[in-house]
Image (tube, rainbow, N blue to C red):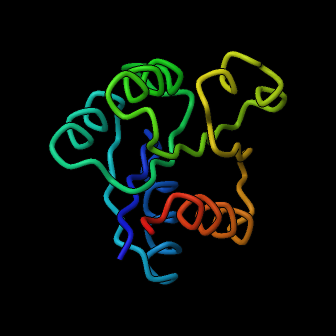
Amino acid sequence: MHRILVVDDEKNIRILFRDELEEAGYIVELAESGAEALQKIAASPPDLVILDIRMADMTGIEVLHAIREKHPDLPVIMCTAVRGLKDDFTIWDAEVFAYLTKPVDLDDLKEKVRLALRENAPS
């Protein structure tokens, strides 16, 4: 079963994503900060990270770059309330699998998760 790490400083978003993704059959872990996410990834890398861009301790971009240093193939879905950020090429240069804008369409979230995990499933 695939493990997903949801990283968001908004508790309600973490719980909503966890509930939706667990109902879809995934194991979901939560992190409320970039530092906590990096600790969890170092201890046991998940199969996918869903990462908020705006957080108090670090930006999602900083977390993404730290992930890429040690886990260049770990799929990451960026999620933010900042509209138009997906046009920022610095995010895409860091090899983000997909981008979601809040409020997130939960069906779109689950579809992007499914695609990310299928493309990165072991043969």
Answer left or right for 101 relative to 22: right
Residue 53: x, y in percent?
57, 30
Residues 69 and 55: in front is 69
Q: Compared to 113, does 57 lie above or below?
A: above
Q: Compared to 118, does 13 lie above or below?
A: above
Answer left or right for 108 relative to 67: right
Image point (77%, 19%), residue name: 88
Image point (51%, 48%), residue name: 50
The quarter of the rendered structure image containing the C terminus is bottom left
Residue 38: x, y in percent?
28, 32
Image point (43%, 27%), residue name: 68
Residues 10 and 90: in front is 90
Residues 123 and 111: in front is 123
Q: Compared to 118, does 45 lie above or below?
A: above
Residue 24: x, y in percent?
52, 82
Quarter of the view holding residue 104 = bottom right
The quarter of the rendered structure image containing the N terminus is bottom left
